[in-house]
Image (tube, rainbow, N blue to C red):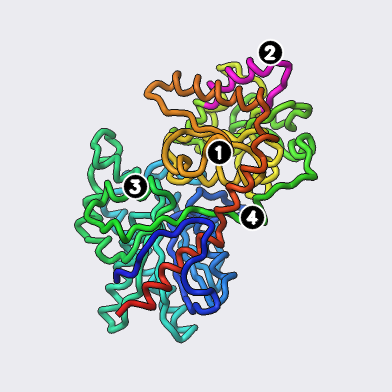
Amino acid sequence: MRWFVGTFRGGGSPGLAATARTQLIFQLGTNNWQSEQEFAPGSGILHAQLHSKFNTMDGVTCHSVFPSRVQRFERPDVRVFELDHDIPICESVSPVSSYRWHSMSEEDFEAYRDRLLDFVTAYIDDVEADLGRPFDLFIAHHAFLNPMVMAEVNRRRAATGRAPVPLVAFVHGTALLMFAHELRGEHPEYPVRFHAKMLEARVFESVAGIFVISDSQKERFLEIFPDYERERVFVTPNGIDPAVFRVLPALTRDEVLARFRTAPYEGSAARSVALPSGADRMVLFVGKFADIKRLDALLRAAVIYQAEAAAAGLRVVTVIAGSGPPADQRLYQDMAEDLGVQGAQFIGPHDQPALAELYNVADIGVFPTKFEAFGLVFIECMACGTPVVGTAAGGPLEFVDDTVGALVPDADSDVVFSDALGQTITRALLDDWKPQKHDACVARASRYTLTAQCEAILAAVDERLRSAP
C-alpha cells in the first residue's frame, strides 16, 4: 500500500490528466459542515469544500459522512451522523462545541466509536450496492478516531472476502495538539490515553499515506508518530475558492459595514447596533474564540495602534468576526471594554461570502494564532487584496513575507508579544500598506486553490495506484 512518491504543492497539477481518472471516493469528517443552522470550524469547512470540488472534477465522485447535533438531512452523496450531544473535539474550542474527547468515559467513547463504525459501514455498503462497484479511496479526516474507524471498516471488508480500500488520512492540527498535550504530561485535562490507544490499535499501519497542509505540520506529525515513514507524509497546502475570495473593487467600506451589526453576548448590557461609518482604517480579525487564537493579544495591541493612529489623525475600527462558547464571548467583549479599546466591534461568525466582503474593505487582516497548522484565513484575506499580520510560527512562515505583510516573533511574555503586535499593526496603518502590497497579496494567494489541492491529492493516488503491483 505504499503508493506515494514526491511532494505536491499549491499551484501545480502533477500526475494523470483529470479525464483519465475514474475515482470513487469516501470521506469521513470529524466536524460539521457549515449551514444556516450551524457554523463550522475550519476542518469542517475544508471537508465540505473538498467534497464539492471533487464532485466537479471529471471522472471523480465523492461521498461523505460528517457529524452534527443540529443538521438533519440526507442526500445521495452525504449522510449526517446524528448526535444528541455536542461534537467531541480534540483540543481547542469549536464554534459549536467545547465537549472534549478526554471528558468522555471509556464506555462512552467505545459506544461512540462503535456506532460511528456501524453507521459508516452501512452507508458505504449502500453506496457500493447502488453503484455496483467498490470505492477506490477512503479519506479519513484528522489523526484520531476517523482513521481508527476506517481501518476497522477495511478489516470488516476483509473478513467478508472483499478487498480493503486504500486508506489515507488528512491530518488537521487539533488532533496533533491533543496528542502533544498527552505526551508532554503537563496538562491535567489531557492524561495519557488516546495516543497510546492509537499505537495499541496500530492504526497508522493501515494508513497508506498522510496528507498535511504545511511543512511544519508534517514535522509535528512525525514527532508524535516517529515510526511512520517520512516519505509517506505529503504536503498539500489548503486552498480557497477563488470565486468567493477575490477582489471586489466596487465595494466601499461604509457600504459593507452597514450590512453588519454587533453581537453582544447574552446578558450583556450592550444592544446590537449597526457598525460605525467613516473610519479611516480597518483592522480585521477572523477566528474562533480560543486561547490559541490569541484575540486577547490583538485587544491589547489595539490600545497601542489606536492611540498611534489617533495621534496621526486617523480613526480606526477593529472588526472581530467569530465566536465561541458564551463564557469566551463574555471574556473578550468585557476585556475590550476594560482595556478601553475604542472602536472594537464584535459581529459574531459569518459565512464565506460575507467574510470576503470584510476582507476586501479591511486595511489589514490580523491573525495572531500561537501556531497555525497552515493559516487559511491568511490566504483568504490576501486573495481579497489585503495584507496580513500574524505570528512567526507554523504554516504562515511558508508564504508570508514583507511583500504581503509581516509575522511577529513569538515571545514567552504576553505583554512583549502584544506590544510587538501593536507596533507592527501601527506601521501597517500609518504607512498604508494596502495599496503597496495589494497586487503581491493577490498574486501570492493565487497559488493556493481548492482545485490545486484536489489535483495534488488525486495525482498522488493516481500515480501510485497505476504503478502498484
Q: Earlier in the sequence, mark 2 or mark 1?
A: 2
Q: Earlier in the sequence, mark 3 or mark 2?
A: 3
Amino acid type assigned to the residue bearing label 2 in the image: Ala
Disc 4 and disc 2: Cα gap in Å? 38 Å
| Residue 42 falls left or right of residue 3 | right
**Residue at the top extreme?**
311
Q: Determine the secondary structure under disc 2.
A: helix
Amino acid type assigned to the residue bearing label 3 in the image: Leu
Query: Mark 1 highlights which residue?
Result: 323
Q: Are marks 3 and 2 in contact (CB under 8 Å)?
A: no
Of tags 3 and 4, the one toward the viewer is 4
**Residue at the left extreme?**
200
Residue occupying the point 60% across, 52% down: 446
Q: Position of residue 295 (x, y in %)?
A: 52, 30
Query: Mark 2 highlights which residue?
Result: 311
| Residue 358 falls left or right of residue 287 | right
Is residue 117 visible in this depiction of the protein?
no
Q: Earlier in the sequence, mark 3 or mark 1?
A: 3
Q: Position of residue 82 (x, y in %)?
A: 47, 60
Q: Are marks 2 and 1 in contact (CB under 8 Å)?
A: no
Few, some or many residues within 10 Å of mark 3 (<14, 14–19, 20+): many
Q: Which residues are magenta?
A: 298-317
Amino acid type assigned to the residue bearing label 1 in the image: Ser
Query: Mark 4 highlights which residue?
Result: 242
